[in-house]
Image (cartoon, rainbow, N blue to C red):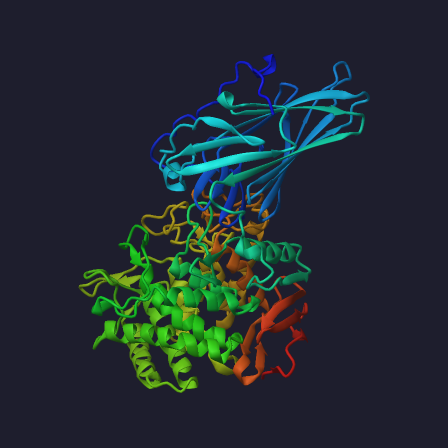
Amino acid sequence: MGRRPSPPALQGHPAPVPAPRRPGGLPEAHTVLICVALPGLAISTEQGQLTGQGLEGFYRAGRRVLSRCQVRVAGREPTAIQARRAAADRARFVATLRASPGTGPDPDVVVERIRHADGTERITLYSAAPRPLRLPVEVALGTDLADLGAIASGHAGPELSASVHGSGLRWSGLGGSASVAADPPPTDALASAGLLRWEFDLPPGGTARVELRVQVEGAGPVRAAGRAATSPLAPARAAGDHPGVRALLHTSVEDLQALLLRDPAHPADTHLAAGVPWRCGMAPAEALAASRMTLPLGTRLAAGTLRTLARTQLSVPAAQWGMIPGPRRDAGPHLPPSCTGTEATLLFPVLLAEARRWGLSQQETEELLPAAERCLAWLRTTVGDGTYLGDTHPGDPVRCETQAHAHRAALLGADLLDTCGRPGGEELRQWARQLRTAFREEFWIEDRGGGRPAAARAPDGGLVPHLGSTAVHLLDTGLLGGGDQAPGLLDRVQTEQLARLLGSPALNSGWGLRGLGAKEPGYNPFGHRSGAVRVHETAVAVAGLTAAGYEKEASSLLRGVLAAAETFGHRLPEMYGGEQRTEGSAPLPHPAACRPSATAAAAGVLLLTTLAGIRPDAPAGTVTLRPVRSAPLGELGLTGLRIAGAPFSVRVSRLGLAMVEEAAEGLQLGA
């Protein structure tokens, strides 16, 4: 196709270069609309135009392959009317313009853009004009081929020069090559301005359509793991009296599907990315925690995550043999960063033990058992002759939540070893008993308010007294056989006091659980670990309080986070501001929060399944129901869950009575 000089309508439109961002912070993520089907992303503002500013653009595997896609019709930019996420992986933008002069203020052309995370965009023009229209359409394109890390640090670099390529444009740089192909091919393509141009004749009521496809040279089309027919997550559904339950579970499952990744060397194994846009790879502790919360959707995600992480388990150095490595994580203003590798290593045998209860096959359990045994051996070796499990860094404090993770791993690990005929279970139980005795005496701070668990013990034995949401892990004791919960580190009186604290205004913001109590030194309602509401820990608190019998406190937190979910379109971010809820207020978005987030999406599953109190024991062929008797959301029905690989459905009445409506053949209701 011949290339003509640019017509007058195209003159004076050089490709804009994004303005440099001020240093000192990430680009804002709370104001953008994110479509995700990893490894593909599309990030836009509600205006619909991709201008190259901030995070805007199409991404593939962490690299921005198109940063600018601006549409002009009849020489003008249409007026943005509405932006809406239609699904996890696509969004719809509607804009209008008035193309017929002298016809009054009403727009007579609608411009619809359907944007997909896989790199496609469909632009459709609808004419409501009373006479035929000839409309020139221009699309200005550009890219910097920057990786997400450079964009986050404000060093994306300038746009690259384009060249005409096939039915579109192409760019090349150090980050590789990318192109945009258009269907139908443009009438004109101007590489120097990055412009494609069409002329459309629209009769009254007529339409015209352009489809753009962003392609990465040398790479095939995006094959999102979550879009495959073999997705590991069951398409569960919720219905009930509360208007938000259906949307919350639907969106949670959709976002989990969108965050799935395959292990390139073992494509049958899928796991979850931590979150978008900042953490599009695996974070071991978060991947395990999210897999555990989604066991009601089946065990295949847990199995793939466990197999993937087993391949990372350390064999050297000897001191860390058996550990699953993980990065350090900020722990707030009172403690040094913690080791997520410790948390992941302790979660591994817990997830395997509970996945077995939900129906993981004996064969898969036995294949993964050696890795779990190495995790448990690392635990016993690291503790040695002591009582507490410390951090991997010498001189770091002994943390409260680490003891909760270790105690749960010991008890569920012992149960797993016993049921699989392996030795070592009694030794783990004996250490867990010693830890319980010591913890109840040495980790509890008495005060006039009834006391509180210490956040940590310093190397000199002093207690770190601040109260934060990490204490909820003391209530997350884990599932044993027969529908029984494992014992916890706290005694009955201490558990009751912790429940009271979690339900107090200091921690319960009305939208969920703050990471740090509002009265504690260093409290910051936007602090990652110092006051922001963390959805994962709120869901753990709801489940733990419910299991311990404190339904009033659990229900208050549950209703708060469901109210927050509604304001976020039921796509919960990993965290949001901890400002106290008041009449007519709304939760404050956190500008750096991942959304979607694996743990936040999985928390939606945990919150709703907790209401039914589902406690399976697939090896024994039983399932026990412990529903929330107060039925805080009224009647609730959950369908399409999975136990023992078969569909499972349950309904909870307004009286708090649970009834199984569908289950695997032979699965019996436990006492």
For the question of whether residue 494 can be seen, the reply is no
Which corner quadrant holds the C terminus? bottom right
Image coordinates of residue 487 in percent, x first then y, are 41, 77
| Above or below for 582 versus 184 | below
Which corner quadrant holds the N terminus? top right
| Above or below for 390 versus 26 | below
| Above or below for 92 versus 388 | above
Image coordinates of residue 340 in percent, x first then y, are 33, 60
Q: Seen from this angle, which residue lies furthest top?
A: 8
Image coordinates of residue 459 in percent, x first then y, are 19, 63
Q: Which residue occupies the foreground of this view, 461 or 285?
A: 285
For the question of whether residue 568 can be seen, the reply is yes
Q: Dividing the picture into quarters, in which one does residue 492 lie?
A: bottom left
Q: Dividing the picture into quarters, in which one does residue 90 lie?
A: top right
Q: Which residue occupies the foreground of this view, 369 or 563?
A: 369
Q: Is residue 532 left or right of residue 79?
A: left
Count of marks, rendered view = 0
Identified at 44% across, 76% down, the residue is: 353
Identified at 28% across, 53% down, the residue is: 334
Q: Seen from this angle, which residue lies furthest front?
A: 1
Q: Is residue 492 left or right of residue 601?
A: left
Q: Which residue occupies the foreground of this view, 265 or 283?
A: 265
Q: Is residue 626 left or right of residue 475?
A: right
Image coordinates of residue 435 in percent, x first then y, are 30, 76
